[in-house]
């Protein structure tokens, strides 16, 4: 065989080999970019299929975060238990102490010695996130002591499997020892709906009448996305804007937790994006690259130090380096079984 023909033969063989390798190589999974309206040190999120317990999405879901008014979900859980046991009825009058009345807003501005019935107290905590009412309920159920009630809340959290949660008050106002995780809040959200379906309708209310005036709520997800039927928002400066959202429509039931957003509007946009992502199988199966607030699209993955540098130890007082966001892509994890 002449030299030119030999060279052509070798080129054809090489080309055929490349085609064979390309045909046998599995294509890389698609990658999507998800904008995160929070700094990485505050952000945490999880999406759970409430019917199966399967985790569909999670980032920093077990890292400790401040619950803010998501705390009232546990206060309500304890109050629903008291209703179920017959310890209180919806007509029971709960007294307001000096301590309860002195809580900072948001509140209904009770004075010492006034009372509120249990039915109105539930609505005040769900809709208005009233701190004075939450503390009054905590004192009533805690035998006159909010500290005792907080210990009862923490014990209930352990019973439900909320391993990262400790409560110090009934309302969620700032306390360095009052911590939780996105995963724990998902456990609590599922537990509220599974244990007390007869009371879950309260979480879908966006306003209520009290003493002749209309009290409006904070949860703008209600009415914004078809299928959203609750449950609770929260904010303190240390936590950022938090929310636990229940979506229940077209045979799908999701619990979505977002913590640490920079504004309520951005938080709500993010929840809607997570719902849409979880309902679209082709998107849910894709790897998700997170783009945090202030991060440029071309920058490295969050948490990955630039060449020649080291990762920061921590940016939140009291949080270990292990609580910082993982540099990995967002991904599902082990199933989260419905809490009993």
Image (tube, rainbow, N blue to C red):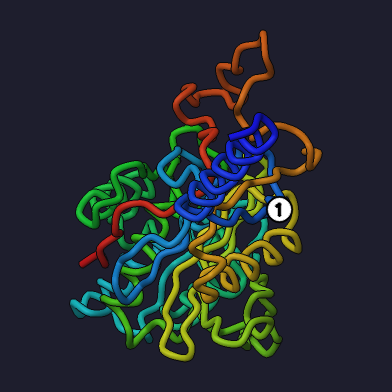
Judge whether 156 appears above or below 92 on screen.
above
In depth, the one of 125 and 268 nearer the eye is: 268
Q: What residue is shown at x 65% (from left), y 67% (from top)?
A: 273
Determine if residue 55 is in view.
yes
Q: Position of residue 220 (x, y in %)?
A: 69, 74
The quadrant of the rendering that contains the C terminus is bottom left
For label 1, the SS is strand
Q: What residue is shown at x 30% (from left), y 79% (from top)?
A: 196
- Counting other residues with Cα less than 10 Å from the Cα at mark 1, is it few (<14), some (14-19), or many (20 or more)? some
Q: Position of residue 330 (x, y in %)?
A: 52, 48
In depth, the one of 208 and 234 nearer the eye is: 234
Judge whether 109 appears above or below 148 on screen.
below
Determine if residue 98 is in view.
no
Q: Position of residue 156 (x, y in %)?
A: 25, 55
Q: What residue is shown at x 55% (from left), y 48% (from top)?
A: 16
Give the side of residue 201 with respect to residue 275, left or right. Answer: left
Q: Position of residue 178 (x, y in %)?
A: 45, 40
The quadrant of the rendering that contains the N terminus is top right
Give the side of residue 112 with respect to residue 331, left or right. Answer: right
Q: Disc 1 marks which residue?
A: 35
């Amino acid at each position: 065989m002449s030299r030119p023909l030999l060279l052509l033969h070798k080129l054809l063989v090489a080309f055929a080999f490349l085609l064979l390798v390309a045909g046998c190589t599995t294509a890389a999974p698609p990658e999507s970019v998800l904008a995160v309206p929070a700094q990485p040190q505050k952000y945490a999120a999880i999406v759970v299929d409430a019917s199966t317990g399967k985790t569909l999405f999670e980032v920093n879901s077990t890292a400790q975060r401040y619950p803010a008014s998501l705390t009232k979900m546990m206060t309500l859980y304890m109050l629903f238990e008291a209703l179920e046991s017959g310890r209180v009825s919806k007509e029971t009058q709960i007294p307001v102490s000096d301590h309860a009345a002195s809580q900072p807003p948001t509140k209904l501005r009770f004075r010492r010695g006034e009372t509120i019935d249990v039915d109105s107290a539930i609505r005040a905590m769900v809709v208005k996130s009233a701190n004075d009412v939450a503390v009054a309920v905590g004192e009533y159920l805690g035998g006159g002591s909010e500290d005792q009630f907080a210990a009862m809340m923490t014990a209930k959290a352990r019973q439900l499997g909320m391993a990262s949660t400790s409560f110090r008050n009934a309302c969620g106002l700032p306390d360095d020892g009052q911590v939780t995780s996105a995963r724990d809040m998902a456990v609590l959200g599922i537990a509220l709906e599974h244990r007390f379906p007869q009371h879950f309708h309260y979480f879908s209310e966006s306003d209520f009448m009290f003493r002749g005036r209309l009290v409006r709520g904070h949860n703008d997800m209600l009415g914004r996305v078809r299928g959203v039927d609750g449950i609770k928002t929260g904010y303190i400066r240390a936590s950022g804007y938090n929310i636990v959202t229940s979506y229940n429509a077209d045979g799908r039931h999701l619990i979505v937790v977002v913590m640490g957003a920079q504004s309520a509007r951005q938080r709500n946009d993010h929840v809607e994006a997570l719902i849409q992502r979880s309902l679209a199988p082709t998107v849910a199966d894709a790897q998700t690259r997170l783009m945090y607030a202030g991060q440029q699209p071309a920058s490295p993955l969050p948490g990955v130090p630039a060449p020649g540098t080291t990762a920061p130890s921590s940016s939140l007082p009291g949080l270990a380096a292990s609580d910082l966001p993982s540099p990995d892509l967002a991904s599902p994890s082990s199933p989260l079984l419905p809490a009993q």
